[in-house]
Amino acid sequence: KMIKSIEQELKAHVIQIIEDQQLQSTDDLHFHAFNKNYYVALHDQAEQWLKKHDLTAWQAINTVQKFNGYIKGNIQDLTINPRSIVNLYIYIKGIQIIHKYDFF
């Protein structure tokens, strides 16, 4: 289940990307919204983002580990630092947002 404030923030981000990039379909939407650039650029910003959404680092790491294990079959190459974990968490939640809403 997704935290409501995260869902609202990421949904607004997707809408903004659609408008800024003038996208017409979901084909490249996830790439432009969550993969082209870091959503959170600095470690301090990542820690603040977690606090803002009342999400613990352990919750985010758990989500990332599960996803990484599902996709790659292991978690050994996972980089553990605030920025990488938060951006991977947002990447994962971005997939869910794009599948949940009909943006076009």
Image (spheres, rainbow, N blue to C red):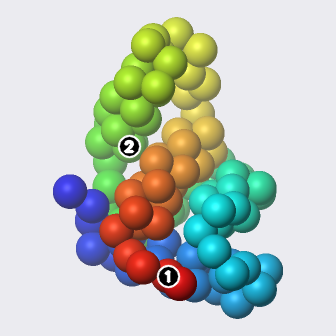
Image quadrant holding the N terminus, namely: bottom left
Res 24 visible: yes
Circle 1 residue: 103
Q: Residues within 10 Å of mark 2 (few under 14, many from 20)?
A: some
Q: Which of the 4 image quarters holds residue 5?
A: bottom left
Whether residue 87 is situated above or below residue 12 in the rendered picture: above
- Disc nearest the viewer among 2 and 1: 1
- Residue type highlighted by circle 1: Phe
Label 2, label 1: how far apart the Cα atoms are = 26 Å
55 sits left or right of 35 in the view:
left
Viewer-closest of 85 and 44 = 85
Dot 1 lies on which element? loop
Q: Which of the 4 image quarters holds residue 6?
A: bottom left
Q: Are marks 2 and 1 in contact (CB under 8 Å)?
A: no
Residue 35 numbered tag: none
| Relative image position of residue 60 (x, y in whole percent) | 38, 43
Res 82 visible: no
| Residue farthest along the bottom direction in this orientation | 19
| Relative image position of residue 102 (x, y in whole percent) | 42, 79
- The residue located at (69%, 81%) in the rendering is 24
Dot 2 lies on which element? helix
Q: Residues within 10 Å of mark 1 (few under 14, many from 20)?
A: some
Whether residue 5 is situated above or below residue 29 in the rendered picture: below
Residue 60 numbered tag: 2
Viewer-closest of 87 and 92 = 92
Whether residue 88 is situated above or below residue 4 in the rendered picture: above
| Relative image position of residue 87 (x, y in whole percent) | 58, 49
Whether residue 35 is situated above or below residue 74 in the rendered picture: below
- The residue located at (47%, 25%) in the rendering is 71
Viewer-closest of 89 and 32 = 32
